[in-house]
């Protein structure tokens, strides 16, 4: 898997280039023995967010490398770009067009209706159209493990969650994280704040600083580019940690990012690409959790001084219990209110 944006792929990032897209439109179709042609429209965070969009892009590059697909990316600078970008790729007859982010649900629905012969896939939302595949994740599963790790690492018995926009999708992260922390320390305090967007690094830096100042010593940030701001904030705070999200962000501040709750958007993209290459154009709803390797934590590469072998063993035990159904992480605030820690036999 690719770990970042490599220069060799720069030509694939098509920011509305009609010339390059026109060239792609003359390629032999997959039905005629040509390579699968996969298009992608990013969310407003764009490539280089080191999080959600980059994870999707890794899946696309894996399809290029391993499945020999032709790929193209259109970046969205604002929500007004979603429908035009999707329409451009539909007009160029791509075999599968990925929409990266729940904010594109309405636009995907409209474009898919106008182009019934084209096939689309949306990440983080469900669009009920026969030519649309929907991919969602059990974010609460991985966030539960993140909360458990945070509670183990915390010395103040206070941790925090910093989200992007306060919507049901982000509350899955919030609820799972708080429950995981309480599984380890039932009396722990879990503070919650939202930045109001997914592309405001300055807000992430400021609000994470507020949470640290209020006593939290571990902050889990699920807020797109705001997470980069939080990581910048924690670099100057001895004894404090952040938890990254979506992509492996551990190396952005070695020893200060406790772990990252990876959301394997790349896995979802690649699985649908495999189906497309096999000419089984995907549809329906794919749900990825711990069992499907759709979410999980990084391996504490830089924080083993804090996450000792005993603590890592506890994380593995919790993971197995979630997969087995012994623990069901909450996905809403209402479910969180009813959550009771499960005895771990410590």
Image: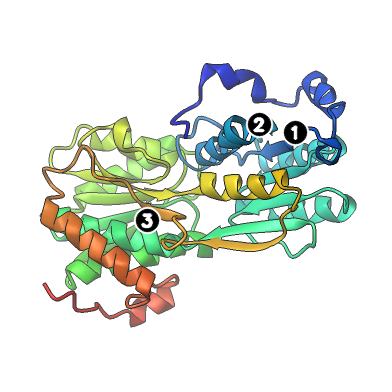
Tell me the tag on residue 193.
Answer: 3
Q: Secondary structure at mark 3?
A: strand
Quadrant of image for the C terminus: bottom left
Tell me the tag on residue 68.
Answer: 2
Give the vertical position of 147 relative to 302 (above or below): below
* Left or right for 22, reference 72: right
Which percent across, then down, holds residue 37? 75, 35
Q: What's the distance in space between the residues labelled 1 and 2, CA to CA?
A: 7 Å
Q: What's the distance in space between the residues labelled 3 and 2, CA to CA?
A: 43 Å
Q: Nearer the viewer, residue 319 or 336?
A: 319
Q: Quadrant of residue 182?
A: bottom left
Whether tag 1 and tag 2 are in contact, CB under 8 A, the answer is: yes
Q: Nearer the viewer, residue 36 or 269?
A: 36
User: What residue appears at the point 50 percent right and 44 percent down from the top-left corner?
Assistant: 198
Read off the residue under disc 1: 35
* Left or right for 334, reference 199: left
Q: Quadrant of residue 248?
A: top left
């Amino acid at each position: 898997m690719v770990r970042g944006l490599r220069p060799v792929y720069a030509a694939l990032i098509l920011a509305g280039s009609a010339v390059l897209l026109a060239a792609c439109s003359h390629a032999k179709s997959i039905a005629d023995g040509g390579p699968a042609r996969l298009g992608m429209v990013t969310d407003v965070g764009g490539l280089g967010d080191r999080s959600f969009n980059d994870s999707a892009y890794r899946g696309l590059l894996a399809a290029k490398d391993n499945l020999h697909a032709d790929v193209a990316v259109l970046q969205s600078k604002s929500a007004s770009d979603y429908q035009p970008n999707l329409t451009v790729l539909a007009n160029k007859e791509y075999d599968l067009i990925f929409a990266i982010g729940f904010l594109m649900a309405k636009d995907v629905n409209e474009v898919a209706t106008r182009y019934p012969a084209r096939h689309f896939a949306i990440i983080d939302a469900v669009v009920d159209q026969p030519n649309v595949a929907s991919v969602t994740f059990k974010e609460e599963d991985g966030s539960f493990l993140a909360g458990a790790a945070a509670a183990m690492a915390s010395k103040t018995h206070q941790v925090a969650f910093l989200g992007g926009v306060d919507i049901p999708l982000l509350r899955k992260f919030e609820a799972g994280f708080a429950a995981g922390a309480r599984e380890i320390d039932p009396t722990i305090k879990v503070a919650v704040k939202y930045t109001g967007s997914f592309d405001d690094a300055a807000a992430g830096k400021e609000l994470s600083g507020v949470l640290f100042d209020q006593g939290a010593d571990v902050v889990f940030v699920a807020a797109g580019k705001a997470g980069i701001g939080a990581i910048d904030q924690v670099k100057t705070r001895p004894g404090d940690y952040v938890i990254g999200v979506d992509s492996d962000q551990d190396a952005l501040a070695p020893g200060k990012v406790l772990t990252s709750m990876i959301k394997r958007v790349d896995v979802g993209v690649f699985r649908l690409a495999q189906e497309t290459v096999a000419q089984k154009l995907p549809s329906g709803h794919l749900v990825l959790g711990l069992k499907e390797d759709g979410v999980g934590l990084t391996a504490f590469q830089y924080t083993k001084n804090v996450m000792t072998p005993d603590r890592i063993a506890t994380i593995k035990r919790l993971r197995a219990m979630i997969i087995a159904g012994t623990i069901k992480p909450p996905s809403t605030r209402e479910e969180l209110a009813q959550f009771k820690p499960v005895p771990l036999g410590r």
